[in-house]
Image: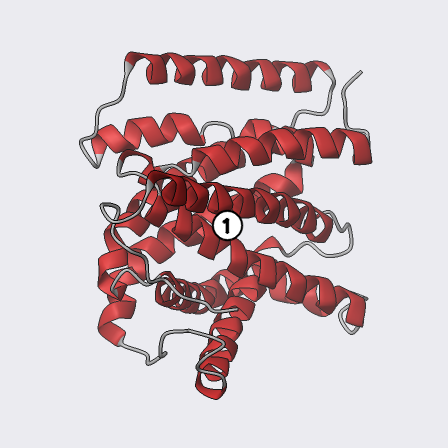
């Protein structure tokens, strides 16, 4: 198995091959996205540990560690693993910093949203990503969209309001979770736009972008952990020395690393208009999360 970002130009690729690549990337995003949501829900649902920022920080640290592991494997097995050489460049790190700030907001508010709402309503709270994509594409990238796309955004807004209303009727609505979900949706859209802008800084290499992004985030999260008081919560956690807990944390970091990579792949392989919105994967993931969660966790409101 080889890890490589090298792709032929769109002009040289047959349509079938191009469509197959996009379908494969979307399917991969679909699988990893669902797994990541349920895994984070498991980690954040603990009543004993109130440390969502630390959990996110640890996932970033694991991602940086995985980058170095793949880097060393590419040196040991050059014909088997293809990974770019990692050499820290302060200039590149500084150029990636705006994306990192948005990235921190995205994963932090995602996790905070999951902490206050169930997985089923999480998909509703996060549904505004497409609406923000359309708005920001016009405001930042000066890209217009069709009337039908705007009409779809209206349907999404209606569905969002209906979801909030029904959750309120059921008595399980958390306005805090709703607000975090809306902010997370905004950050998801900004993350896609900034990823597109920053990719040239790392020569279009998604692995390098993931490395610098997670390295920056790991450093920036440290003061946030101290300020939020999570260090004290962590030290008082009675399962801090349990292997199962750290195993799940590491697994969360692996999936966090994977979803960052496949999100970058979607932005890289899809058409210019859709580079700012990995919508097919997100839509499929939302539908599947809703169905699976309803079946496994019985979170359907009567």
Q: Residue furthest left?
A: 142
Looking at the rendering, which quadrant does residue 210 occupy? bottom left
How was the colour assigned to the protein in this rendering?
secondary structure
Q: Is residue 149 left or right of residue 240?
A: left
Q: Is 69 placed above or below 188 here? A: below
Quick check: can you spot residue 7? Answer: yes
Quick check: can you spot residue 229? Answer: no
Query: Residue 171: percent from the left, percent from the top?
Result: 73, 20
Q: Is 155 placed above or below 192 here? A: above
| Disc 1: CA contacts within 10 A as few (<14), some (14-19) or many (>=20) | many
Residue at image coords 33%, 49%: 268
Residue at image coords 60%, 18%: 163
Q: Is 160 placed above or below 188 here? A: above
Residue at image coords 76%, 65%: 245
Circle 1 SS class: helix
Q: Is residue 106 left or right of residue 62?
A: left
Looking at the rendering, which quadrant does residue 113 occupy? top right
Query: Residue 170: percent from the left, percent from the top?
Result: 74, 17
Query: Residue 4: percent from the left, percent from the top?
Result: 40, 66
* Residue underneath mark 1: 107
């Amino acid at each position: 198995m080889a890890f490589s970002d090298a792709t032929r130009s769109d002009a040289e690729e047959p349509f079938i091959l191009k469509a197959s690549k996009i379908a494969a990337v979307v399917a991969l995003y679909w699988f990893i996205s669902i797994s990541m949501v349920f895994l984070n829900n498991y980690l954040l649902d603990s009543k004993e540990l109130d440390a969502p920022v630390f959990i996110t920080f640890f996932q970033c640290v694991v991602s940086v560690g995985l980058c170095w592991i793949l880097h060393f494997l590419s040196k040991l097995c050059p014909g088997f693993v293809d990974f770019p050489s990692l050499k820290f460049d302060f200039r590149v790190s500084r150029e990636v910093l705006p994306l990192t700030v948005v990235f921190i907001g995205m994963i932090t508010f995602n996790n905070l949203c999951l902490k206050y709402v169930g997985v089923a309503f999480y998909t509703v709270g996060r549904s505004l990503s497409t609406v923000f994509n359309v708005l920001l594409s016009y405001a930042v990238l000066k890209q217009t969209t069709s009337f039908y796309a705007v009409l779809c955004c209206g349907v999404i807004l209606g569905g969002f309001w209906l979801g909030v209303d029904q959750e309120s009727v059921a008595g399980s609505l958390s306005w805090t979770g709703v607000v975090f979900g809306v902010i997370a949706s905004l950050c998801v859209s900004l993350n896609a736009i900034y990823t597109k802008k920053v990719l040239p800084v790392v020569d279009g290499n998604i692995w390098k972008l993931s490395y610098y992004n997670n390295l920056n985030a790991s450093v920036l999260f440290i003061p946030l952990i101290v300020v939020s008081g999570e260090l004290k919560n962590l030290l008082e956690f009675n399962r801090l020395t349990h292997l199962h807990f750290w195993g799940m944390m590491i697994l969360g970091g692996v999936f966090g690393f994977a979803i960052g990579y496949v999100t970058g792949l979607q932005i890289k392989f899809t058409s210019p208009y859709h580079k700012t919105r990995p919508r097919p994967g997100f839509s499929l993931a939302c539908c599947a999360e809703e169905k699976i969660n309803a079946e496994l966790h019985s979170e359907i409101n009567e």
